[in-house]
Image (cartoon, rainbow, N blue to C red):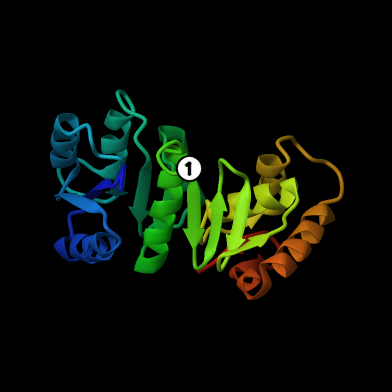
């Protein structure tokens, strides 16, 4: 597997072991660091690291300072691990260059799925497929297979499924979906998304249950 080396940065050894065990089982190579300074030293010497899982609250050098330094010389994908859920913290992280957020406590299986989706999104030339629970998207061929059978999707249905599966476990607002899938600021009736979701679920059969409605917000692809 290409792009499979991941740097886990967390001052809690038990948390690092938990994450390492699940990622190793999915054939990822793991490097560990107990604080931001150690992480920087490792990352600067190893250009094969493809993704960093970075805790926020750490001694010596916290996650924010570590990320700020990383972004001065690298665009490596970074997922922040944080117990905080404040919107301002997340906005601050995105301004610094965070790619994803995962709040503690989290499901290790969801973490693995989010890692896989982010790596696929950031390194599209290394593997053109996204595959989750029998749903396989070939991004180059624009083909979707469900349990080995072709799903006849329209272009917008394909792009919608691709966006949802690239953000596993993330609750996506209708506005965000419209801006990313339709590629412009949409001021019309957001029910167009509901219509596409309904058709997409039907074409995915039983697998359509992975697309969950988030009441008052939008949708998410949940494992």
Count of numbered circles on the image? 1
Q: Is residue 52 visible?
A: yes
Residue beneath the point at 42% across and 59% down: 113
The spot of residue 106 in percent (x, y) is: 38, 66
Residue beneath the point at 13% across and 40% down: 38
Q: For this rendering, which residue is in front, 58 or 105?
A: 105
Q: For this rendering, which residue is in front, 25 or 187?
A: 25
Is 124 left, or right, of 146 in this rendering?
left
Is 71 left, or right, of 123 in this rendering?
left
Determine whether 128 is above or below 21 in the image. above
Residue beneath the point at 36% across and 63% down: 104
Residue most extreme to the top: 73
Residue most extreme to the bottom: 206
Determine whether 186 is above or below 68 in the image. below
Q: For this rendering, which residue is in front, 186 or 221?
A: 221
Q: Can residue 92 be seen in this view?
A: no
Which residue is label 1 attached to?
Answer: 121
Determine whether 101 is above or below 93 in the image. below
Is 10 left, or right, of 91 in this rendering?
left
The spot of residue 52 in percent (x, y) is: 29, 44
The spot of residue 216 in percent (x, y) is: 71, 64
Q: How crowded is mark 1: few (under 14 residues within 10 Å), some or many (20 or more)?
A: some
Q: Quadrant of residue 207?
A: bottom right
Q: Quadrant of residue 65?
A: top left
**Secondary structure under badge 1?**
helix
Residue most extreme to the front: 149
The spot of residue 64 in percent (x, y) is: 31, 40
């Amino acid at each position: 597997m290409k792009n499979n080396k991941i740097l886990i940065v967390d001052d809690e050894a038990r948390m690092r072991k938990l994450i390492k065990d699940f990622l190793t089982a999915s054939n990822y190579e793991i490097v560990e660091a107990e604080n931001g300074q150690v992480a920087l030293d490792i990352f600067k010497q190893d250009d094969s690291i493809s993704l960093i899982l970075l805790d926020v609250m750490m001694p010596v050098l916290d996650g924010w300072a570590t990320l700020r330094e990383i972004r001065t010389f690298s665009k490596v994908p970074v997922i922040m691990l944080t117990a905080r859920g404040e919107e301002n913290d997340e906005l601050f992280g995105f301004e610094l260059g965070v790619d994803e957020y995962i709040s503690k406590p989290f499901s290790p299986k969801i973490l693995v799925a989010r890692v896989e989706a982010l790596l696929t999104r950031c390194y599209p030339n290394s593997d053109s497929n996204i595959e989750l629970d029998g749903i396989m998207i070939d991004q180059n061929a624009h083909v979707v297979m469900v349990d080995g059978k072709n799903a006849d999707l329209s272009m917008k249905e394909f792009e919608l499924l691709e966006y949802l599966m690239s953000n596993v476990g993330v609750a996506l607002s209708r506005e965000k979906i419209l801006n990313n899938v339709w590629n412009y600021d949409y001021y019309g009736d957001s029910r167009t998304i509901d219509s596409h979701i309904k058709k997409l679920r039907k074409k995915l059969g039983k697998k359509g249950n992975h697309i969950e409605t988030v009441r008052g917000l939008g949708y998410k692809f949940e494992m």
